[in-house]
Image (spheres, helix red, strand yellow):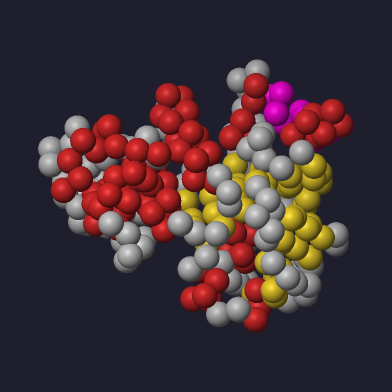
Amino acid sequence: MGSMSVTCRWGLSARWSGSRFKQPSSSRTNSGRIPISVILMLKMRHYDIADGRILIDGQDLAKLTQRSLRKQIGVVLQEAFLFTDTVMNNLLYANEDATEEDAIEAAKKANAHDFIMNLPDGYETMLTERGANLSQGQRQMITIARAMVADPKMMSLNEATSNVDTRTEKLIQDGMRKLMEGRTSFSIAHRLATIRNSSRIMVLNGGEIVEMASHDDLMAARGFYYALYMSQFKGKGPGGDPEEIAAGFVST
């Protein structure tokens, strides 16, 4: 098994090596392959690896406490999780030192401010369980704003633009771009347009890394990534098991 090493703009380096993981059987696909989402779980130390090491800025993740590690990593998932509380409190939850002004500024950057102001009570609008009184796209934009309030050194994003319309996807992508500025970001996406500007793309098929390079280099190679990207560009979609065809990237 090879390794991945990334050096970020602001000096942090990350390295991935090893291929065998300690994980419960419930986290595997029916075929026994390791889902790509496990990569994010490893980085957050939900699982520990059996062989190899994951290094961040030269430090072995296995030697860091979960608390100290997770304070440095922001997360935006496919399913946004919001609390039954006001919009403002949902934003401030990420950082106990943040002010309401910080939250509003983050919402503006995440393209959430305008729709929040149109809610019945603006930032004091009470959200129902899991934010069910908002659309999927609105929930995701609040989640991105909350991550901005947290101001982590690293970001993990998992299918953050899934299940939204094209217009909302563009707003979310713009918010994600601002969120990732100056940070190491690791993202999982099947919509390859969302990751094409990353510094390095890992292409996974059947739980194995089959290609790894920048978007331009992968397109020039005319391999698996090229075929997948062109099928999406033509509107045919990637097809196949979503756990078998995926792209992860590290952006700096």
Q: Residue at x 34, y 44 (%)?
A: 105
x, y (%) of residue 38? 61, 60
Q: Position of residue 78 (x, y in %)?
A: 47, 47
For residue 192, above or below residue 213 = above
Q: Is 227 included in the stretch rendered in magenta? A: yes
Q: Determine whether 157 is above or below 70 in the image.
A: above
Q: Is 114 located above or below residue 211 in the figure?
A: above
Q: Quadrant of the N terminus?
A: bottom right
Q: Quadrant of residue 200?
A: top right
Residue at 27% from the left image edge and 49% from the top image edge = 101
Q: Is residue 245 visible?
A: no
Q: Is residue 140 left or right of residue 236?
A: left
Residue 173 in the magenta stretch? The answer is: no
**Magenta part of the protein: which range?**
223-231
Q: Is residue 157 visible?
A: yes
User: Residue 106 is drawn in which quadrant?
Assistant: top left
Q: Locate residue 45, reporting x and y percent.
A: 58, 71
Q: Nearer the viewer, residue 205 or 174?
A: 174
**Residue at left 69%, top 24%?**
231
Most distant residue in the left direction: 120
Towards the viewer: 1 or 213:
213
Q: How many marks?
A: 0
- The residue most toward the top is 234
Residue 149: % across, % down:
38, 54
